[in-house]
Amino acid sequence: MQTETATATGAQKAEQQAMVANSAGSLSFNGSVASSVGGNGGDEEISRSVLSNFRAKEEEIERKKMEVRERVQAQLGRVEEETKRLAMIREELEALADPMRKEVAHVRKKIDTVNKELKPLGATVQKKEREYKEALDAFNEKNKEKVQLINKLVELVGESERLRMKKLEELSKSIESLR
């Protein structure tokens, strides 16, 4: 649930960045300012592409996470079923004269081995989930920083344009006063 919220927040941030870039003039992919003479379709395409790639990676991570979780759950379910079956078999064998004692001991050892193998798998799942959350948080933080930098760039470009227009008006007035 948190992953979906974080994904939605990341998507919203990417859309906001695209809107900021489009309203202040086009930004090329490497971050330099390009003139908006030909429109900003390329920027929208880049934004869509980046957003699409981000969503695809998020979906792939979520899918892999679910696959690992399902495999672990499936193995846990199988182990539990096998444990129950073996307990019943053990009871039946003990009711007899124990002619298969060696085989029962062997199966018990296998169960113990499988249980030992499951513990690190569970720890690995938890570790991967923690790493995923940390990576997502780092990504969102950098994305936020990028939006702030884009906003600062837009502000600086706007200020530069105002100063240049003011200077041009002053020069124009001085030229007219010379006539």
Image (cartoon, rainbow, N blue to C red):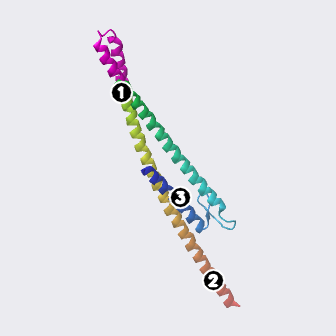
- For disc 1, the marked residue is 115
- Say which of 73 and 141 sits in front: 73
Label 3 crowd bin: few (<14), some (14–19), many (20+), radius 10 Å: many
Q: Residues within 10 Å of mark 1 (few under 14, many from 20)?
A: some
Identify residue for label 2. Answer: 169
Q: Earlier in the sequence, mark 2 or mark 3?
A: 3
Task: Assess disc 2: are there few (<14), some (14-19) or many (≥20) residues with their C-alpha within 10 Å of its C-alpha.
Answer: few
Picture quarter containing residue 116?
A: top left
Q: Is residue 35 magenta?
A: no
Measured along the vertical axis of the image, is residue 116 above or below residue 129? above
Query: On screen, 161 above or below 88?
Result: below
Q: Nearer the viewer, residue 26 or 136?
A: 136
Q: Nearer the viewer, residue 34 or 166?
A: 34
- Residue picked out by circle 3: 14
Residue type, numbered disc 3? Ala
Residue at image x 66%, y 84%? 172
Which residues, given as a range, are shown in magenta?
85-113
Q: Gap in Å between the C-alphas at discs 1 and 3?
A: 45 Å
Residue 28 on image: x %, y %: 62, 59
Label 1: state its secondary structure: helix
**How far across and how far down the image is residue 139, in percent?**
47, 52
Q: Position of residue 37 (x, y in %)?
A: 69, 68
